[in-house]
Image (spheres, grey):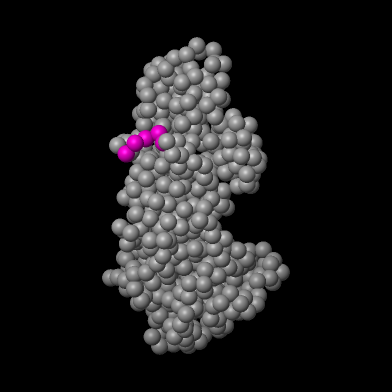
Amino acid sequence: MKKEELQQLARQVRKDVLWEIFSAQSGHPGGSLSAADLGTVLFFDEMDITKENAQGQKRDRLVFSKGHAAPLLYALLCEKGLLEKDDLTTFRRINTRLQGHPNMNYIDGVDMSTGSLGQGISAAVGMALANRLDGNTHRIYALLGDGECQEGEVWEALMSAAHYQFDNLCVIIDHNGLQIDGKVDDVMKVDSLYDKAIAFGCHALQINGHDMDAIKTAFAQARQIQGKPTVIIADTIKGKGVSFMENEAGWHGKAPNATQFEQAIKDLGGDAQW
Amino acid sequence: MVKKATREAYGEALAQLVKQNPDIVVLDADLAGSTKTSEAKKVCPQRHFDMGIAESNMMGVAAGLAASGKIPFASSFAMFAAGRAYEQIRNAIGYPHLNVKICATHAGLSVGEDGATHQCNEDLALMRTIPGMCVLQPCDAQQTTQMIKAIARMDGPCYVRLSRMAVDAVYDENMPFTIGKGNVLQKGEKIAIVASGIMVQEALQAAKQLPFVPTIVDMHTIKPIDKALLCSLAKDHQLIVTAEEHSIIGGLGSAVAEVLAQQPHACALRMVGVFDVYGESGTPQDVLHKYGIDAKTIVNTILTQPFQ
């Protein structure tokens, strides 16, 4: 898909994200917005998921290891036709399929139930193993946060993926530099993620996570790598696209009020379509 | 009769199953020789994966395998499977109700010499709290074989509690085994001993030392517990004594208490188990004796009751 089309889609995805969180008056905008371009390229350019093949494993799969970015996953599924626009307003409400963190049994296209950080990447390793055993050549993607990399399980998972040479696995780290308590560098430094990924036996790339072409190129390169998993460290801006949310740790898990929501939609082009 | 540990029977049963069912994938965490998944590795090395000393990741990988239609068997010691990886089991396996079989060995005090850090007396309590988790504990080799076959057939997450120590056989090859149905080993009067795991043998020993014939039940399924059987025992007996190689907090005794407290027939309950303490090093026999996990304690518990 062309860069401009992807950018247009990503703007709509960001609006959907804000609509969900504004409707629920609860949720995580910062990390959903930072990974929106990555998610858009995954769903509309890289992965072969469609409405028709959403059930089952005969397609590429994506584990949202940073499960708190559920609004982003739901927005992507909505733009892909796997959720209705009306579903988005049920986010985080009682009896909803759109749980605060994703539940794989409620929605086709949600490949793993996640939310507890560090766990999704292990499940992605298990999926990569299953695909190898089955001779299934579809790829497995895992989206992580950089704060999430403070969890020891992330490194256990990378160690095992490299040990078993899962080149069908691509790990994307949304490197926005912020977590709930502040800057990742201040709370608990995880960098250099690039050097660590290399040291753990993975192929590593560091890219601008808002540059559609760079993201596409990174995925294309990852497909060519043999004998090891690829880790893409995507430098991003938390809250990307919304002026007052950008680079503010305070918007990790806070909903905008009506005025803020209006401003946010304006920042994104002001042509919200619900 | 030759004694055999339930972990040995697990290894043999798994080796058979892994050959028959191509969906089965075996995971271990650097303990294959001890958990006996090494038996499965011998016959099917291409579907046995050592995940290293990283139990949390192993459980997550098992979840990913199950989410892909595989039937993963994940093994480690009970302490590190149920204990260290509790949250992975709860959130990555239990919550999505994935078809993962957690077969944990070296449970309880009978680990012996390794001491308190390795003697897990809390795993039943931990696993029992996870919604939808089936929790099982065999008492001998024959039952283990049946149980492992049964869990491979059923869909959903299971936790099987296995032991290091060799034990006497309770059953022959014709034993009945149904998940969720306790086995009445002998029918008696006044008192019913409800035991699980290695305490089934101890309950049978204890019965020989009592001045009357007690009912003895092997409660191999801790969850879902056999409520119907427990209610009928409560109706026909004055006292139920539970016997387990596990903390009395949260294990078989607690599971029985939860049922008895909510049924109409008055029946007293006493528990034999580990009384909220850590174990210590020693031979399995010495440790079990010191902490009262034996026939003698069952007998004393019964004979000192005012219900005689």
Q: Is residue B265 visible?
A: no
Give yes or no for residue A4 being in the magenta stretch.
no
Residue A168 is situated, as x and y percent measured from the top left of the image, at 43, 76
Q: Residue at x 49, y 23 (%)?
A: B206
User: Would you identify the image quadrant in which residue B56 lies?
Assistant: bottom right
- Magenta portion: prevailing SS class: loop
Is B185 placed left or right of B290 in the picture? left
Q: Is residue A237 above or below residue A102?
A: below
- Of B27 and B167, nearer the camera is B167
Q: Quadrant of the N terminus of chain B?
A: top left
**Residue A52 sits above or below residue B102 on the image:** below
Which residue is at 56% across, 20% downward?
A: B300
Q: Estimate the x, y position of residue A79 in percent, counting from the top left.
A: 38, 73
Identity of the residue furthest to the front in this view: B1
Q: Is residue B279 visible?
A: yes
Left or right: where B289 falls relative to B21? right
Frontmost residue, B173 versus A242: B173
Q: In the displayed image of the protein, which residue is found farthest to the left? A: A52
Q: State the extent of the magenta-drawn residues as a range.
A: B169-173
Which residue is located at x 51 percent, y 33 percent?
B244
